[in-house]
Image: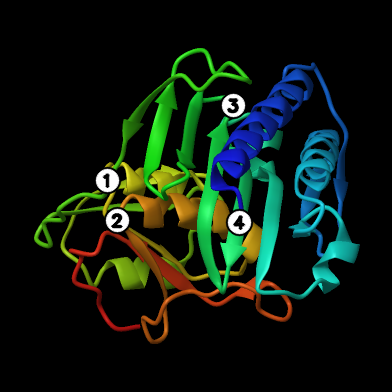
Amino acid sequence: MDYEKLVSVMRKLSLEAGEKIMEIYDRNDFDVKSKSDNSPVTAADKAADAIISAGLRAAFSDVMLVTEEQSATHKARGDTFLIVDPLDGTKEFIHRRGDFTVNIALVENGKPTHGVVYAPAKSRMFFTQADGQSVEETGAFAKDVVGAVTPISVSNADNSALMVVASKSHRDQATDEYIAKYQVKDMKSAGSSLKFCLIATGEADIYPRLGRTMEWDTAAGHAVLLGAGGDVVRFDDHRPLLYGKDDFANPFFIAHAPTVELKPA
């Protein structure tokens, strides 16, 4: 895999998709439909997916592609694949809360090694460079020229005063009960894969997810967190969260800075 090319293509496609998403977001109204699992989908999901999938297939025709919005790709199997959630946080998009992201990642041998997370409404861009180091880009986000980037890294967590990040749309009693096992200084709420990125930048220490997610929801954020020195483990036994599962469904998991002393499930 040409990682320099991969990063360039993923970054550019995320910006193109984000531009289309914001065009629809800024309209007075847009249609919202329900998928077979009753999750919402909008024209922005579809338009962003068309841009990203066409671009990835053109640039990497020999690499398997899995994308949330194309059910036919969910039958694909392989050790190396590109995985896409063109609009993660559709509920945040619908309610105009801004916490939605474009997510593109490469998985190799069960591990998301490279990824980009772009939050167009918040003007935040995170990605792994070719060498695997994660950075946050700031500036005008020109499609063909990378702007100023800052290497990011996880916190040196204070286990007597942890910063926890949790979902805006999927918070429940089980999550609160698990969080209560820790000494918490403060909590943040965030939508979509931004939760991984807040840990990657050191803005939070731990994100427990006790709810259903799919691999396309987490792969890009997981890659960014790994490239910043963090980790994502299964909730039940704290083994690494792996990708390429038969149904692409994740178990419950914990994203964290390595210095966090994890509590048992």
Does residue 36 appear anywhere in the picture? no
Q: CA distance from mark 2 to mark 3?
A: 25 Å
3 vs 4, front mark? 4
Q: Nearer the viewer, residue 251 or 184?
A: 251
For image coordinates 45% across by 41% down, the residue present is 129
Q: Residue furthest front?
A: 2
For the N terminus, give its image quadrant.
bottom right
Residue 262: give its label.
none
- N-terminal of the two: label 2 or label 3? 3
SS under mark 4: strand
**Dot 2 corresponds to which residue?**
229
Label located before the other in sequence (3 or 4): 4
- Look at mark 4 in the image and give the residue it sits on: 106
Residue 243, image quadrant = bottom right
Return the residue nearer the eye: 221 or 209: 221
Q: CA distance from mark 1 to mark 2?
A: 6 Å
Q: Secondary structure at mark 3?
A: loop
What residue type is disc 1 on? Ser
In this view, 246 is above or below 121: below
Q: CA distance from mark 2 to mark 4?
A: 18 Å
Q: Nearer the viewer, mark 2 or mark 3?
A: 2
Q: Would you call the spot at circle 3 few (<14 residues within 10 Å), some (14-19), or many (20 or more)? A: many
Residue drawn where x is 47% and y is 57% of the image:
222
Q: As displayed, is residue 32 above or below residue 36?
A: above
Asked if the residues shown at circle 1 and circle 2 are in contact, with their CB atoms under 8 angstroms apart, the answer is yes
Q: CA distance from mark 3 to mark 1?
A: 22 Å
- Mark 3 to mark 4 CA distance (whole Å): 21 Å
Q: Which mark is residue 120?
A: 3
Q: Amino acid at mark 3?
A: Pro
| Identity, as a three-letter code, of the amino acid under mark 2 | Gly
The x and y percentages for residue 241 are 48, 74
Of the numbered discs 1 and 2, the one sitting upstream in the chain is 1
